[in-house]
Amino acid sequence: MPTGIEFVPWTNAYILLDDGGRAHVVDPGVDGERALDRLLDALDTIGAAGLDGIVVTHVHPDHVGLAARLRAATGAPLLLGAAETSTTEPEWRDGAGRAAALETWGVPVDDRADLAAVAPADEHGRAPTADTALRDGDLLPIPGRVVRVLETPGHTPGHVCLHDVDRRRVLTGDHVLPRINPGVGLGGGFRTNPLAAYLDGLERIGALDDHEALPGHEHRFRGIGTRCAELRDHHLRRLAEVAAVLAAEPDASVWSIASRITWSAGRGGLRGFHLLSALAQTSMHADLARSERLATLLACRSGGAPPGDR
């Protein structure tokens, strides 16, 4: 499904057929009449006998946007993670929340105007209310298939992956992508450090290494354990850099830390939204670096240079 987003032009919508030939759609994509027609045409093409469920891995508009329109057109219920909220973006993406974040992060006054001017997220409205809230271990109501819900918070608070047990596949949403490093903390309502939750989820999904990964973007792939390890090591190397800065200057601001750690584009290459995102990520790493988990996490590092950021 086309997104209109330059760096992720497609969201992968998956159609799971039950033993009666009825369809269950995972992540229908962005909203719009053309998108609805595209998806309904796909259902017709494969000969689906009807649509019995709309499952969404997380509430970002490129995954959940079409869900309300699709539900209204077909009567199919919407299922999404119980911990998801209708707030699809983190607090630092809007005006008031962004102003507070810039001050908390220690951004110099002269640098705040450019960051404050970055356009807020285009949410296409708030996420619709689910008909069924999914919890860890739940089985999707798909006759003839065993598809288990795996809670994997981090990208958003209630992100879920779907374990297609018999076919040995994992629908990973935006938790694990084959080449892009998924953003962390890109949702409102987190009660714990999003990065800590994300690292735990990578370990959990990585244990399914003999399964095929069906991600929310890019292409399906194998070697999910290796990919999860790459993503985990990326964050742990960044965590080590942040911890080193804090060891030398315990009260360093997020702005100061971000200026002293490695970025693939160089610190000077980060502008606008990408700089905002970098500061948010640095804040999460700094919180984790000050936590009791630091020593245990850094003991798991594989070494090597940090990969590129997305």
Image (spheres, helix red, strand yellow):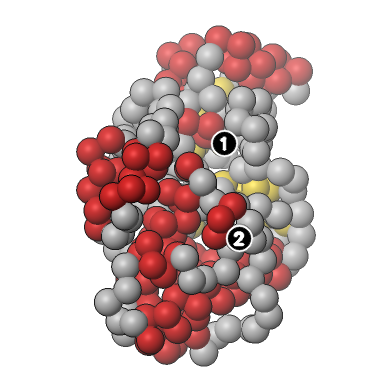
Q: Position of residue 209 (x, y in %)?
A: 69, 68
Q: Position of residue 240 (x, y in %)?
A: 49, 80
Q: Is residue 174 above or below residue 64?
A: below
Give the number of the disc on residue 266: 2
The residue drawn where x is 65% and y is 47% is 215
Find residue 37 and report its image quarter: top right
Mark toward the start of the polypeptide (2 vs 1): 1
Looking at the rendering, in which quadrant would you find the N terminus?
top right
Find residue 251 and report its image quarter: bottom left
**Amino acid residing under circle 2:** Gly
Q: Position of residue 224 (x, y in %)?
A: 69, 63
Residue 23 visible: no
Question: In terms of secondary structure, where does tag 2 sit?
Answer: loop
Q: Is residue 221 above or below residue 26?
A: below
Q: Nearer the viewer, residue 172 or 125?
A: 125
Question: In terms of secondary structure, where does tag 1 sit?
Answer: strand
The residue drawn where x is 42% and y is 35% is 118
* Mark 1 burial class by Cα count in 10 Å: few <14, some 14-19, many 20+: many
Q: Nearer the viewer, residue 297 or 149?
A: 297
**Amino acid residing under circle 1:** Val
Q: Residue furthest front?
A: 110
Identify residue for label 1: 26
Which of the two discs, 2 and 1, sits closer to the camera?
A: 2
